[in-house]
Every structure is written in C-alpha cells, then in structure tokens.
Amino acid sequence: MRTTFMMMCIGLLALSCKNEANAEAIEAFEKNSQTVLANLEGWQNENMDYSMYADDFAMMETAFGAEKDSMNLEEMKVADKMMWETYDFEMLEDPVLLPGVNQDTKMADGSVRHYSQWRIIKPATDSTEAKSGLIRLYESFDFDENGKIRYQQVYGDFTGIMTYLNNGE
C-alpha cells in the first residue's frame, strides 16, 4: 500500500509539473502571437520592425530552386525591400494562429504557426496594367528566451504566383 501511495504521489507531482510547463507554454504562445501579428502587419504595411528578430535569426529558404537552405536577417532585409519595391501585399483575413510544438517532445513550446490568405499585387506601370493573385500561406515562428524570432519558415506556391504575375496566365 505504501508503494501505491508513493506511485500516486510521483504521478501527481509529474502531472503538476506537466501542467505548469503547459501553462508557461500557453503564456509564451499568447505573448509570441502578438509578435507574429505585429510581424504580419509590418510586412503588409512595408514597415517591418526588425528589432523583433534575434541576432542569430535564420529563415528557411523554401523556394523552388533556392541556392541556399536559409538566409540571415541582413539577407532577409534585402529580400523584403526588393519584394516591396515590386509588389504590394494585402492579408485578406485574420490569420489563424496556432501553438507550435517541440519536434522532440511534441509538447507546446511557445512557438507560433499560422495560416493566412494574401493578395499579391503587381502595380500598373506606363506599359502594363496592374495584376494580382491570391496565395494561401503556412508560416511558423520559433522564439528565443528573450521573445525574439529566432527561426522562421513560410510555405506557399510563390513560384506559381510570381510566374503568373510576371509572365501572364
């Protein structure tokens, strides 16, 4: 009976620790979700606050035929500027924010992922009419201990929409 009581105590202690860790992950997710929303708004408004990124930030390169597997913050700033010079971006709906999980433990870890739909517009020029297309995205953000974005990845058919916007239907 004493062994049973000890096992119950250990089980309750483990459950208590798990609930505390889960509460911390939920709190981190809620805080980090605000950063993600600010990030998406900054992208849409072409006014990104890059101070939300960690110094050791990396963004996975998911484009077809990418020459590198990732880019650092300085490379991302250059890529962002080039995109904003050529296109306008409009998020069409509030993103669906979901908690991410640690790939090893499968437990919530404060990371944030989202699904969203965007309109990408190639503005008119003297010789071309404006053109736009819709794209659905999945994006994930991992954060460091200071709440800064450490890792980001985005998936969507950018090759398809860029081909459409630049080469016709």
Image (cartoon, rainbow, N blue to C red):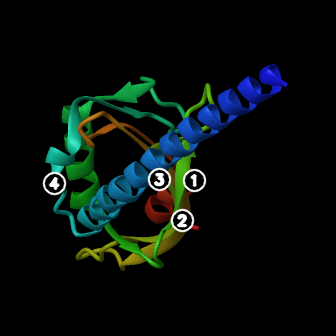
Q: Do the residues labelled 4 and 3 touch (CB within 8 Å)?
A: no
For residue 2, above or below residue 39: above
For residue 131, above or below residue 144: below
Q: Residues within 10 Å of mark 3 (few under 14, many from 20)?
A: some
Mark 3 secondary-structure assignment: helix
Mark 4 secondary-structure assignment: loop
Name the amino acid type tagged 2.
Answer: Ile
Disc 1 target residue: 157
| Residue 22 image point, x, y percent | 53, 45
Mark 1 secondary-structure assignment: loop
Residue 79, can we see it?
yes
Q: How crowded is mark 1: few (under 14 residues within 10 Å), some or many (20 or more)?
A: some
Q: Kindly identify which numbered label has been placed on residue 135.
A: 2
Q: Do the residues labelled 2 and 1 touch (CB within 8 Å)?
A: yes
When asked about the image quadrant of residue 27, the answer is bottom left
In the image as oriented, which residue stretches furthest toward the top? Answer: 3
First of labels 2, 1 by sequence position: 2
Mark 2 secondary-structure assignment: strand
Frontmost residue, 134 versus 148: 148
Name the amino acid type tagged 3.
Answer: Ile
Gap between marks 2 and 1, in whole Å?
A: 7 Å
